[in-house]
Image (cartoon, rainbow, N blue to C red):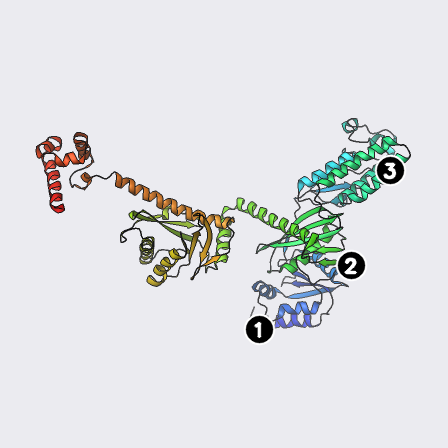
Amino acid sequence: MTKEENEKRLERLKQIVGSMPEKPGSYQFYDKDGTIIYVGKAKRLKSRVSSYFHSEVDRYKTKVLVSKIENLTYTVVNTEEDALLLENSLIKKYNPKYNVLLKDGKTYPSICITNEYFPRIFKTRQINKKWGTYFGPYSHVPSMYAVLDLIKDLYHPRTCQQPLKMDEIERGKYKVCLDYHIKKCGGPCIGKQSHEDYIKNINQAKEILKGNTRGILRQMREEMMALAEDLKFEEAEAIKKKYELILGFCAKSEVVSHTIDNVDVMSITNDGATAFINYIHVSNGCINQSFTFEYKKKLEETDEELLSLGIAEMRERFKSHSKEIILPMALDIELEGVTITVPQRGDKKTLLDLSIMNGKQYKFDRLKQKEKLNPEQKSVRLMTELQQLLKLPRLPYQIECFDNSNISGTNAVAACVVFKKMKPSKNDYRKYNIKSVVGPDDYASMKEVVRRRYERLRDENERMPDLIITDGGKGQMEVVREVIEDELKLNIPIAGLAKDSRHRTNELLYGFPAVTIGIKTDSELFHVLTRIQDEVHRFAITFHRDKRSKAALHSELDDIKGIGPKTKETLLKLFKSVKNIREASLEELGKAVGESKAKLIMEYFENKKVVNS
């Protein structure tokens, strides 16, 4: 599209926007093929849609959307709530490219009460509203089984799949199954349980599934007392058993407050590209529904925009008529007869915190599932997290860490470990013998090793690390910085891992002057960083031990040119020690190893006497 064509397109669209009313409604954007690519809602249509065409729009993805719009239409409604519901239904119908993608959790089971003459109650993952009434879905499956077991124990709904009809029951067409004989069914198929009594039980089961256990208990108590007054103690005892079953079920439920009734709670947890909206319904002071929606973001939608969509989805899916919705933030929407509450303390704040906790747990579980399928995703996540935490210029793909090891300055060594994608790259590990430092000077040793490492990488035009981590605090960071920035003129970020008084790593340092970075010590990222630190320490210690072992096994005979391992072994076997070899005569040595080697040995020790005298 040429610049002129684009300007004409925008002018045409702005003319359409100019004629739009300032009323609630939904708007639809179309591409050049006439396909709906975006559906939105607005309290004032003209103001909202015109904002897309302002020159100061700074969202990149929104600019991309606007560049694809060829036409737009709108639908005016009476209230903002109607606009919200219309937007939700249009998104589901057309699945526009630039709208958030709702992963609706169809894999979660629901409980169905069929529309049959004698209804059945069972769990299902298939939703067909022609079959019956559905309750759920249940994201916590054990809770679903608990309520199903309660209903089976209380009301003994039939489990057979026979299409029971009254005329066929009267003709004796059906026979009872095992459930009748073990008293798990009242036998409606042979007329042992009346249709009226069966439906009464089903209606009570529906109230339990709605969470209205208080009403059921009150009704049972009144019926029980009436039967007792009429001296019908056996019937009253049967109701008492059911009453106690429901009481036991309620005791195991999540009771939040006896003062809160018929309230919806929603919270949002963000993951950059994905948002997780948790929904909790509270009835009679108990949580009877909890579900988390997953939204794939397309246009960098705000939390407020996503929560508005979530409210519409919740009210439709769960047939919610709650008069109060508890949210973590205020929304610029008005729902008729509904109060939006943002609690700061008390029972409602406790409920909101519980919803937030559920959303975060769902996000964590989904993340773990994805990382099991794609292990690389975990590495990218941790690298991104570290980049954002330290505000690094690029993803820390390659991280290098240094450590020194010596005993009172002897056998001084250093080690460098390399991690790529947050995993050890052992082929790139390097060991260093300290050459220029005398005595135990960790700072000078660190300078030497860092200088040797990065001078070589620079001279050989090799890849530089994205981050250097020092096994120490501000002092170690500063000496590394002096070499990297002041001497070698390189630009490599430097971090440090500092230890507490118990020699346990407890903080991450970054910057100059170094400051403590806020990171939880029990977080996954901090564990990876301490693993890098532990690995360089292990590698340096292992190298130091190897060097000490070789030094301990070293003999003066190893310094004599022309004397190999076999000759050394023969001499030590015969003379027992280097002292005895030093004091032996030329003739004695000649008999042991030959005249030429004996002369080499004699010359070595004589020269050494001259040097030491």
Residue at the spot 86% in from the left edge and 28% down from the top edge:
172
Q: Is residue 131 visible?
A: no
> Which comes sooner in the sequence, label 3 or label 1?
1
Q: CA distance from mark 2 to mark 1?
A: 50 Å
Residue at the spot 16% in from the left edge and 38% down from the top edge:
563
Q: Which kind of residue does numbered mark 2 sit on?
A: Gly
Quarter assignment of residue 158:
top right
Q: Is residue 64 visible?
A: yes
Q: Which of the pair 438/155 is nearer the observer?
A: 438
Is label 2 in contact with label 3 (beta carbons under 8 Å)?
A: no
| Image coords of residue 556 (percent x, y) | 19, 40
| Image coords of residue 518 (percent x, y) | 51, 56
Which residue is situated farthest in the left direction here?
A: 587
Residue at which label 1 appears: 4
| Image coords of residue 539 (percent x, y) | 37, 45
> Which comes sooner in the sequence, label 2 or label 3?
3
Q: Which kind of residue does numbered mark 3 sit on?
A: Met
Q: CA distance from mark 3 to mark 1?
A: 85 Å
Which residue is situated farthest in the right direction here?
A: 230
Dot 1, crowdedness within 10 Å: few (<14), some or many (≥20)? Answer: few
Using residue 128 as the reference point, say whether residue 401 is left or right of it. Answer: left
Above or below: residue 260 compared with residue 589: below
Quarter assignment of residue 325:
bottom right
Using residue 33 as the reference point, say whether residue 569 is left or right of it. Answer: left
Residue at which label 2 appears: 337
Dot 3, crowdedness within 10 Å: few (<14), some or many (≥20)? Answer: some
Callout in the foreground (2, 3): 3
Above or below: residue 332 compared with residue 156: below
Callout in the foreground (2, 1): 2
